Image (tube, helix red, strand yellow):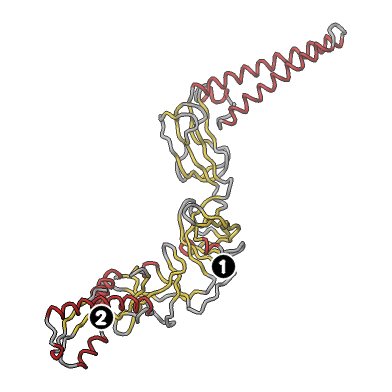
Amino acid sequence: MNARVTEVWSDDPITMREAVADCDLVFSWFVWKELGMSNSIGSKILSGLTLCCALGTGFSHAQTPATQPKLLALDAKQQAALGVQVATPLAANTAQLLASATVNTLPGKDVTVSAPYPGQLSRLWVGVGDRVKAGAALAQFTSPMLGEARRQWQEAQLELKNANSALQRDQAMLDEGIIPAVRVQITRNKQEAAQALVQAREAELRAAGIGANADHDKATMGYASGTLTAPIAGVVTQAFAAVGQRVEPGAVLFKLADDSSLQLDIQLASDKAAQLQVGDAVLVPSREAQAKIVGVSRAVDASQLAKARAVVTQPGRLQVGEVVAITVQAKAPTATSVARWLVPARALTPWNNQSLVFVRQSTGFSAQPVRVLSSNDDMALVEANWPANAQVAISGIAALRALLQKDE
């Protein structure tokens, strides 16, 4: 508070007592002519009184409860000129919590398609937002190492054919008693090793997401080219490469997500997370969606926030990756004697380390402090003793703050 020092010279003791009684607002001092004090002595008295009143003021304000709400007198024309609009708060129950959540797919329902070898994309068949089936072609990939991998696969197939022929020959010779059984066993081991090598070469091409269909690819696009395919059915959420762009092995080319099943990843303060239970209902009003809490972590991260997970039961208009405002209907209500209200988040304004809401009155607006329990980007849950028909300002807040500061 800005202190004001007022010099009061008075012969009247009554005037003196009245001024000193108001010393928490005005620092006053008095000199009686009967005492014969000089101005220098009076100045010293003034300094002492100023210090005492200042100390007294600090103690009294630390122990005095909040003052009555400040009333800003505004008529309808003035409110319209300032752009002030109002809304009616919604009565909230004691089990509601507000938070924000990120829409994600269920674990294992999103995949990344990366470059298997150093090479380049020679053709693209899909883009962001396209819906694909499992095994659908995504892009044509060209790489010399792909050609080398296919050569090794075909060589392994030839070795397997030779090993099968040798095994058949040795088995016939064993049946005629020409060779011993140990020689057949050695030939059989070589045949099994050749078969294992073929399987390994096929697995390498299959893991690359290209496949081992060299004859088809050689006829359509070249021996060193192949088709990258979608490992799951879903929607293409990201595409990172362009035609002709050279990429290194492991470079991410596409991201796919199966959006048939979604979940909400919720972050909130640890004290709020303690109120959640598995099975609590979650509402997403802006997307007409609903979900159900399936897990709550009691540990907090570096930002001191706990995490909870909710499976979407009604997807509405949710999209993977977006951040949405949610309302959690907790099963365990919190005991409180103060009414709770849902107000638009833009109705709150910080003021002297507290949150204020401008409540409409018959002659204007009163700035009333509220206790914010939880909030998200759209709404805030607050505690306040308001009548059922209360209205709060949701626009023109900056103008009302300026008027409030002017009256301070």
Residue 346, percent across and down?
A: 36, 67
Which amino acid lies under the numbered mark 2 shown in the image of this protein?
Answer: Leu
Q: Is residue 269 visible?
A: yes
| Disc on res. 25 | 2
Relative to 97, residue 31 above or below: below
Q: Nearer the viewer, mark 1 or mark 2?
A: 2
Which residue is rendered at x = 52% and y = 51% of the image? 104
Question: Label 1, on which residue?
Answer: 330
Q: Is residue 4 above or below residue 18?
A: above
Question: In the image, is 249 to the left or to the right of 313?
Answer: left
Q: Is residue 54 left or right of residue 91?
A: left
Residue 61: x %, y % from top left: 34, 77
Q: Residue 35 shows which numbered tag? A: none
Give the residue displayed 43% in from the left and 80% down from the top. Answer: 385
Determine crowd level at label 1: few under 14, some 14-19, many 20+ residues with C-alpha closer than 10 A. Answer: many
Q: Amino acid at mark 1?
A: Ala
The disc, 1 or 2, on the residue closer to the chain's N-terminal end is 2
Q: Quadrant of the N terminus?
A: bottom left
Q: How many marks?
A: 2
Instruction: Name the secondary structure under disc 2.
Output: loop
Quarter-wise, where is residue 149 in the image?
Answer: top right
139 is higher (above) or lower (below) than 22: above
Q: What is the C-alpha distance between the residues marked 1 and 2?
A: 48 Å
Which element carries disc 1, helix, strand or loop? loop
Number of residues whose C-alpha sits closer than 10 Å to that of mark 2, classed few (under 14), some (14–19) or many (20 or more): some
In this view, the residue in front, 97 or 47, is 47
Give the residue displayed 85% in from the left and 9% down from the top: 180
In this rendering, the answer to whether 327 lies above or below 162 is below
Q: Nearer the viewer, residue 196 or 92?
A: 92
Residue 29 location (% of width, % of height): 19, 83
